[in-house]
Image (cartoon, rainbow, N blue to C red):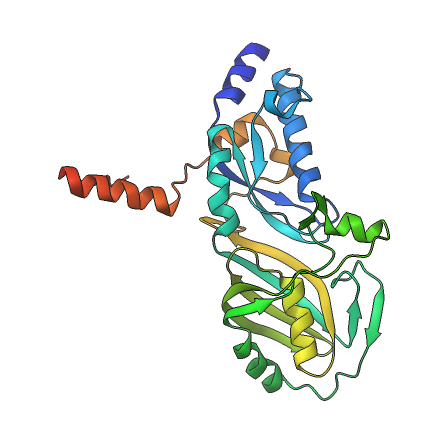
Amino acid sequence: MAAEKASRLLSLNGLFPVYKAPGATSAQTLNELKSRLLKEAGLKEFTKRKKQTLKIGHGGTLDSTASGLLVVGIGEGTKMLGAMLTGSKKYTTTGELGKATDTLDASGTVTQEKPYDHITREDMENKLKTFTGNILQVPPLFSALKKNGKRLSCLVREGAEVEAKPPRPVVAHKLTLTNFQPPLFTLDVECGGGFYVRSLIRDIGEALSSCAHVKELIRTKQGPFTLDDDVLREDRWDIEHVARALQTYTPPEEQASKRLKTEETGAAPDQS
């Protein structure tokens, strides 16, 4: 039985969605999932990266305080994760006006307080228009971005002096204000890769002559997966459920390549 489970686990290839709970990092979530699968299959993990027993990875870090959809690649599916990093994502976030924190979310220390009673719903909706489309954004210091091979968040916590990364181009496809009850407001955010919702909320607060931080953040969609789909929660982190949840995903560039080959050969297009 153990040999059969091990064989089945190591034969799995593709992408599947799991739920990341608030409080855990994306890496911790992935490691727990991997540990459970290996244990069920009666396999041990090699410590050397090049000799991993099970190839598994995730397609984009979620803040430890955030929750929601985490796309996981297994086997050959790990090669598809690049498309998840650069592709479209959706979030629901609640921001709090009047308080700024060093981490740009509720886990940090309050660094500034400003009045917010002058801000109306109309002000907020008008300001969102200026943050929609192609914009420049300064990433948070507390982030997974690296300097000299080490994460900025780790350097900051160690007390090192770290300069903010320069503004970089990102895209917000759609920003929708769904609730406005100052100091709290809720947005639905659809954005491209490299986008930081925490930076967006900070910038919105500043643009409204106040300040703000993220109170709650939930990733609801990434690539072809949504939080409403059959997302695997912890009670279903086993080989059988992973096998059922697996989906093959062809990156857009590969889809284009296949279409080109079809046109060149005159073969009937694949309808799968």
Q: Is residue 54 above or below residue 181?
A: above
Left or right, residue 240 beside residue 116: left
Count of numbered circles in the view: 0
Q: Is residue 225 visible?
A: yes
Spot occupied by residue 131 in the image (x, y as percentages of width and height): 55, 74
Q: Depth check: 33 or 232 in front?
A: 33
Point 50% across, 41% down: residue = 81
Rendered-image quadrant of the N terminus: top right
Residue at the extreme front of the image, as rendered: 148
Spot occupied by residue 111 in the image (x, y as percentages of width and height): 84, 69
Spot occupied by residue 128 in the image (x, y as percentages of width and height): 56, 77
Rendered-image quadrant of the C terminus: top left
Point 13% across, 39% down: residue = 266
Spot occupied by residue 108 in the image (x, y as percentages of width and height): 81, 60
Left or right, residue 19 beside residue 161: left
Q: Depth check: 47 or 72 in front?
A: 47
Left or right, residue 224 beside residue 102: left
Q: Is residue 229 above or below residue 189?
A: above
Left or right, residue 76 beside residue 42: left
Point 50% across, 19% down: residue = 8
Q: Is residue 192 above or below residue 48?
A: below
Residue at the extreme bottom of the image, as rendered: 118
Point 50% across, 59% down: residue = 192
Image quarter of residue 179: bottom right
Q: Is residue 53 visible?
A: no
